Amino acid sequence: MKNQVTELGAYRMLVEQAHDLISAHTTDDRTVFLYASNAFQRVLGISTEDLLGVQLIHLVHPDDAGRVTEALPPALLCNQVTQVVVYRLRHQQQEFTVESSFRVVPTKLVAITRVGGPGVAILP
């Protein structure tokens, strides 16, 4: 995780203190967590260390899993910023109350979840 944080450079402090859930994932079909911001602990009750190596789909609501699974391969293949895919994430207590989204940016899958307000935040 420290390597991923180092890559954040000048934005490191902002990302680590953000209330939004910010994560980076592998761009293969497994979409494993490479980095998860500190907000995951506050919002989902899951430590960032526990998320590393976990597949994103394991936290997605079962009703949303199909949409996420369908959207990932074409998004990852195009290697450019893609459409937003909205889905719900599982809290550690098994409640599906957090809405999230992802965008693929060249070479990385980035997921950002807006906390405390309607809608989702996305990367430009």
Image: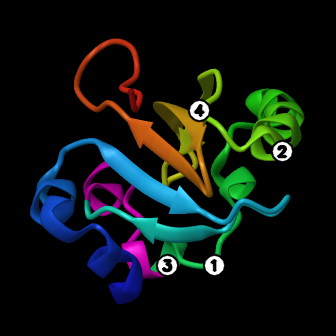
The amino acid sitting under disc 3 is Asp
Q: Image point 83% across, 44% down: which residue?
A: 77
The amino acid sitting under disc 4 is Val
Is 94 placed above or below 64 here?
below
Q: Disc 3 vs disc 4: which is toward the camera?
A: 4
Identify the mark nearer the N-term, 1 or 2. Answer: 1
**Residue 50 numbered mark, or none:** 3
What's the magenta region? 39-49
Kind of element beneath mark 1: loop
Read off the residue under disc 2. Answer: 77
Kind of element beneath mark 4: loop
Tag 1–tag 2 contact (CB < 8 Å) = no
Between the C-alphas of marks 3 and 1, the distance is 8 Å
Number of numbered discs overlaid on the protein picture: 4
Q: Is the magenta stretch mostly helix, strand or loop?
A: helix
Q: Image point 79% across, 41% down: which residue?
A: 72
Read off the residue under disc 1. Answer: 53
**Residue 68 numbered mark, or none:** none
